[in-house]
Every structure is written in C-alpha cells, then in structure tokens.
Image: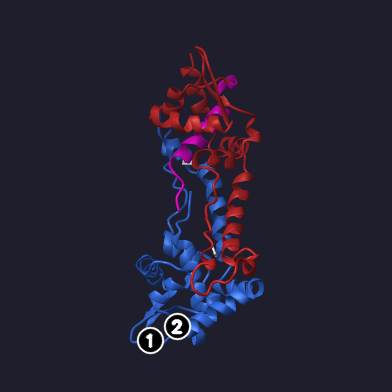
Chain colours: A red, B blue
Amino acid sequence: MRLGQGVEWALHCCHALAEAPDASALPVQQLAALHGGNPAYLAKHLQALSKAGVVVSVLGPRGGYRLGRPADQIRLLDVVDAIEGSSPVFLCTEIRQRGPAALPPANYRAPCAIAAAVSSAEDAWRHALASTTIADIVTASRRQAPEAVTATARWLRETVD
Amino acid sequence: MRLGQGVEWALHCCHALAEAPDASALPVQQLAALHGGNPAYLAKHLQALSKAGVVVSVLGPRGGYRLGRPADQIRLLDVVDAIEGSSPVFLCTEIRQRGPAALPPANYRAPCAIAAAVSSAEDAWRHALASTTIADIVTASRRQAPEAVTATARWLRETVD
Ligand code: FES
Ligand code: FES
C-alpha cells in the first residue's frame, strides 16, 4: 500500500500557495520550478486539486493557481483524496458469503468482523489526516524551518512578474 | 491508495486456521475451497504469511498450514504487513530541499511538517491494525455470526481426511 509521489507535490504546492506573496496566483511553471519539478507532471495534479475545489485556476496575464479557500479550511485529507481518490483503502468483497459452507444472506447481517476492524483502522488514518490543515503546516514550517520559509517567500516574490 | 484483495483472503485464512478443528493443519486446497477461491492464488499469499511467521507449513499426509503462534499473538497488522510489505505508505523524497530557493541541509534539521503529519496518520492506521488480533476476530465472529462460524467448523471437520 503506497501513496503516490503526487501527494508530496500536491501538499507542497498547497503550502507554497498559502505562502504566496499577497495571496497572488502562482503559475504551474513557478510551482514546479520551486522544488525542481516537471510542470507537465504537476499540471495533472493541480487539475485534480482544482476539480476538488482545493485550488482554483485564475485566468489572465498574472494567472495561475491559488487556494480555493482559506488555508485553515483545507485539510490534508482533502488534498490526499483529491490526488488518490476517496474510495476505501480496503474493499471487502464478502468472501465469507462464498463457498460450500456459506449460509443464506440473513446470517451475515452484522458486518464481517475483519472488514469492520480494517475499516476502523482506515477511519483512524482519515481522521488523522482530517485533523491537520494547510494552515497548521504553514505554522509548523515557520517554526521549524524559518529560514527556508523566508527563502521560499523571497524567491516567489522575485519570480512573480 | 488501496490494499490488495490478498489481504481479505489472508485475514480470512488466519481466521479459518484459528477455528480449525483440533488445531489441525489445513491444506491450501481446502482453505481456497472454503470461500470459493483459487488455490494457486492463495498459495502465493500463504507463502508470504509463512515467510512472516504468521503461519507455518506442516509436511506429510495431513499437512498444510496452521497458525505460527496463538491467535491472540497475531495482530491484523502482522497479516497486512506480510501481504503488502511494511514499507511506509508515504515516502517523502525531501522535495523541499530541491529547487532554486533551497538552502543548505542544516536548515532542514526538523522533519518536514508535511511528512510528519502524514506519518502520524500512518502511525494511527498501523496502531489500529496492531490493536486487533485474530483471536479478537474469532470472538467477534462467534458473537455476530454464530451460525456461519458453526457451519464453517462443520465443513472443515467433514472435509479434513
Ligand atoms: S468478508 Fe470481506 S473481510 Fe470478511
Ligand atoms: S519534503 Fe517530503 S513531504 Fe515535505
């Protein structure tokens, strides 16, 4: 089980957009260049974020992407779901109801104990991702790596037209 | 992000082995037939469980697989890791240290706030899977679907040589 690399990029893009000078829109090229990435690759992920409302695209000469709502209303879960899809991690196919020893459906009213346990682990994962917002990442990054945040903000400011 | 179907099969095999009459070994053919599955497909997953010590293979005419240790010492996490591998769900590639605004490594001593948040969600997932054992599944299944458990035990008993 693995999250795609797109999640790291998407989360860092949201972080960069939250720190964009004067909340300006940032073009894909600039978001990709910030961490030495490929604009075509990133464009795909930004479209997924845009479809989910996490970012919005702004047209025009100073166009690009900006956050779709305040950073404290964007949960890491929103970003992960936008990139990975929100279908369950574990898909129970009710194998317990198959085979020579299976009984009629009425005997399986309660969810399978195995499915229930794995689902509750999945809930714990989603709940944890839902409890952190991009605003929390902004705060933590400013505290933990202040020079890096300043350097990024400076670079963003200098490279915006 | 998705768990493979093998996880459902592996967990149900462990459950069946925990309910095997007189703790007898069950052959792959029987474990597969129990829920209408493919023996070759299941054999691959049983080998993975065996490699992880979750099950042991027993040679001889009444051979097959049995649990590698008591059911209350087999956590769902052990089974999921055996099938899916225990490498992290999220792999941070330190993209924050790449690109034109990056600073020397000394500025990134604290783990990236994004990586830390996603890792802690992963910890929550693993912790939840570690807090349920196959013995808990046995108990819950007997309570929730007693007729189905009885029917399975009867079928296992009748089809063991
Ligand atoms: S029947 Fe699907 S996990 Fe039990
Ligand atoms: S550098 Fe990898 S998640 Fe931040």
Q: Is residue B11 magenta?
A: no
Q: What distance separates the C-alpha of mark 2 from that of mark 1?
A: 12 Å
- Circles 2 and 1 on the same subunit: yes
Q: Amino acid at mark 2?
A: Thr
Q: Is residue B101 visible?
A: no
Q: Measured from the top left, where is residue A158 in percent x and y? A: 48, 18
Q: Is residue B122 left or right of residue A107?
A: left
Q: Measured from the top left, where is residue B88 in percent x and y? A: 45, 53
For the point 50% across and 33% down, which residue is it? Answer: A48
Residue occupied by mark 1: B62
Report the span colored magenta: A1-23
Q: Nearer the viewer, residue A8 or A78?
A: A78
**Tag 1 subunit:** B
For the point 55% across and 38% down, which residue is it? Answer: A79
Q: Secondary structure at mark 2?
A: helix
Q: Earlier in the sequence, mark 2 or mark 1?
A: 1
Single out the mark in the foreground, 2 or 1.
2
Q: Is residue A102 visible?
A: yes
Q: Is residue B160 left or right of residue A102?
A: left
Residue A99, relative to residue A142: is it above or below? below
Looking at the rendering, in which quadrant would you find the C terminus of chain B? bottom left
Q: Amino acid at mark 1?
A: Arg
Cβ atoms at labels 2 and 1 below 8 Å apart: no
Q: Is residue A111 left or right of residue A45?
A: right
Q: Is residue A12 magenta?
A: yes
Residue occupied by mark 2: B159
